[in-house]
Image: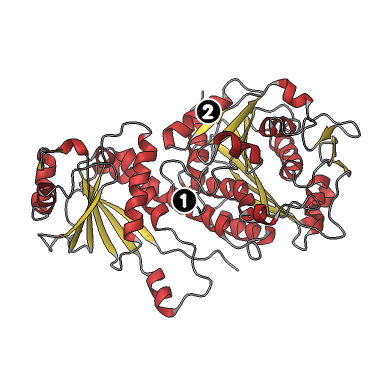
């Protein structure tokens, strides 16, 4: 079964109102453009005149003052441009501008999701529109806002509506720079949608083989080198830890390996993602309430496998390896147990103290394979690894644990700031590493000190398998779904990490 299809959305950039006859015109305006019920911005006065003065009318009756995310609607005074006008406020906020721009886009997208017509014009005088990069974030927010996982059994009418392309025209938007930014936004939004479709899909369908086959097909269509290693090959290769975690499931583990290698690339980076398409906890079984949402435990792989597609389409000059380590943690007679000692691909041994700490066990093999096979300059690993990260940072940002490098943490931090995805670099003190040293084996898969620094000790466990390569563990447990950061929808998948990964690749490509 292929990935379900979303409603197609096309972004366009125009220098004027040439996209006349739209079903809706969305106008962005900041609070500083109004005073005492009047428009004070000459540029906004000009745009409002084109729309028949509806914004000025709304301002006069204090229905709209440009306050943050304030929304007002009116029938258009000039139906040649659009039948209806929606105005949205950019307020006065000056912090976290990329995320704020994306949040405006999400708000617009939520309105567009209610719209039956296929054509929308967006224009404005807000700084969130006149800056090309921020306008691109608005565009991505629009896609985030209209996203909805498709019904598994849509009616004929719903299917027809789903297949009708929505054209979103950015009018008066920054000329060539605006057009280039919107093209980039379209690429990123498409890959974020692909990531979210994997995250939100029901686990009886989105199992390891489903993810592997669908993403491999997308990679091949994009001209990437791709390999999928099934259970038999993984056993032959020595992926004993990964196979142990997946041993209790009828859906066998899969390792997806994608490679983008442009000519002249000076650097190689690897993105490795945890891909537990369902996590029951195994014999250390989760309570029923804690099992809800465990389909999102594959978000790390969804990010890495989607991000490389964007990097390739944007033609960034850096060699990229993307690894998806896919498995299910289930229970049957073949499931791994507490007390088992596993010999990993690296030769190091792990004593299993808790079968619900399975992600790091799967990643132990995947990280060693990545480090020794491809010899990357940097390894960035994404995983919904620890509940302790949610305790630390909530559902607002990801924790970053850098090893073997003075710069890798700052790369992730700069990337996060540039695209408005929050990260926080956390300490990697050696005492945390001491807390996962084993007695029966080289390592325990949980810390010896109960309840102490669970995210930091998990990071120390992972760094044992990267062969000394510069490594950043990025714990996305709090932000893969239910993301509460500015610029993201609530409760469902977020697609967080795709933009971050692409920006990381861009920053590394510019290193000398």
The residue depicted at 30 percent of the width and 34 percent of the height is: 93
Label 2, secondary structure: give it: helix
Camera-nearest label, 1 or 2: 1
User: Which percent across, then down, holds residue 268?
Assistant: 60, 34
Residue 249: image tag: none
Q: First in sequence: mark 1 or mark 2?
A: 2
Q: Quadrant of the N terminus?
A: bottom right
The residue depicted at 43 percent of the width and 37 percent of the height is: 419
Give the residue pinned by disc 2.
411
Give the residue pinned by disc 1.
490
Residue placed most toward the observer, 403 or 322: 403
Mark 1–mark 2 distance (CA, rounded to whole Å): 27 Å
Residue placed most toward the observer, 114 or 82: 114
Q: Is residue 137 visible?
A: no
Label 1, secondary structure: give it: loop
Res. 78 image quadrant: bottom left
Image check: 54 left or right of 102? Answer: left
User: Which percent across, then down, holds residue 478?
Assistant: 57, 42
Q: Residues within 10 Å of mark 1 (few under 14, many from 20)?
A: few
User: Which percent across, then down, holds residue 356?
Assistant: 75, 47
Q: Is residue 429 above or below residue 18?
A: above
Image check: 412 left or right of 46? Answer: right
Image check: 471 left or right of 52? Answer: right
């Amino acid at each position: 079964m292929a990935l379900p299809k979303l409603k197609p959305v096309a972004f366009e950039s125009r220098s004027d109102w040439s996209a006349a006859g739209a079903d809706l015109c969305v106008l962005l305006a900041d609070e500083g453009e109004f005073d005492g019920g009047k428009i004070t911005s000459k540029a906004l006065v000009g745009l409002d005149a084109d729309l028949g003065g509806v914004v000025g009318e709304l301002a006069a009756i204090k229905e709209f003052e440009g306050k943050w995310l304030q929304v007002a609607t009116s029938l258009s005074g000039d139906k040649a441009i659009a039948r209806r006008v929606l105005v949205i406020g950019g307020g006065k906020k000056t912090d976290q501008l990329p995320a704020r721009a994306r949040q405006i886009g999400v708000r617009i997208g939520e309105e567009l999701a209610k719209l039956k017509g296929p054509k929308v014009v967006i224009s404005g005088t807000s700084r969130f529109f006149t800056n090309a990069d921020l306008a691109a974030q608005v565009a991505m927010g629009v896609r985030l806002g209209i996203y909805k996982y498709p019904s598994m059994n849509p009616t004929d009418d719903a299917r027809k509506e789903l297949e009708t392309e929505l054209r979103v025209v950015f009018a008066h938007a920054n000329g060539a720079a605006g057009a280039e930014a919107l093209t980039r936004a379209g690429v990123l939004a498409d890959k974020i949608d692909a990531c979210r479709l994997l995250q939100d899909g029901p686990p009886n369908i989105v199992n390891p083989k489903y993810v592997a086959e669908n993403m491999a097909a997308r990679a091949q269509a994009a001209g990437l080198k791709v390999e999928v290693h099934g259970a038999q090959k993984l056993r032959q290769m020595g992926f004993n830890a990964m196979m142990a975690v997946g041993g209790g499931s009828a859906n066998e583990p899969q390792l997806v390996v994608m490679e983008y290698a442009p000519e002249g690339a000076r650097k190689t980076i690897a993105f490795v993602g945890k891909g537990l398409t369902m996590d029951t906890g195994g014999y250390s079984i989760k309570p029923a309430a804690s099992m809800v949402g465990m389909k999102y435990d594959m978000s790390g792989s969804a990010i890495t496998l989607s991000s490389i597609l964007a990097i390739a389409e944007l033609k960034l000059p850096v060699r990229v390896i993307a690894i998806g380590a896919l498995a299910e943690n289930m229970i049957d007679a073949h499931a791994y147990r507490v007390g088992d000692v596993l010999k990993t691909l690296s030769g190091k041994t792990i004593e299993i103290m808790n079968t619900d700490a399975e992600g790091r066990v799967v990643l132990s093999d995947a990280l060693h394979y990545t480090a020794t096979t491809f010899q990357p300059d940097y390894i960035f690993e994404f995983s919904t690894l620890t509940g302790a990260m949610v305790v630390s940072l909530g559902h607002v940002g990801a924790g970053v644990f850098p090893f073997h490098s003075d710069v890798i943490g700052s790369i992730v931090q700069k990337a996060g700031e540039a695209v408005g995805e929050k990260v926080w670099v956390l300490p990697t003190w050696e005492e945390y590493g001491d807390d996962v040293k084993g007695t029966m084996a080289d390592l325990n898969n949980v810390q010896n000190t109960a309840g102490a620094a669970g995210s930091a000790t998990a990071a120390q466990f992972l760094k044992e398998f990267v062969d000394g390569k510069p490594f950043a563990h990025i714990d996305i447990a709090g932000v893969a779904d239910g993301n509460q950061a500015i610029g993201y929808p609530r409760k469902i998948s977020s697609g967080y990490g795709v933009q971050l990964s692409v920006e990381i690749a861009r920053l590394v490509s510019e290193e000398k």
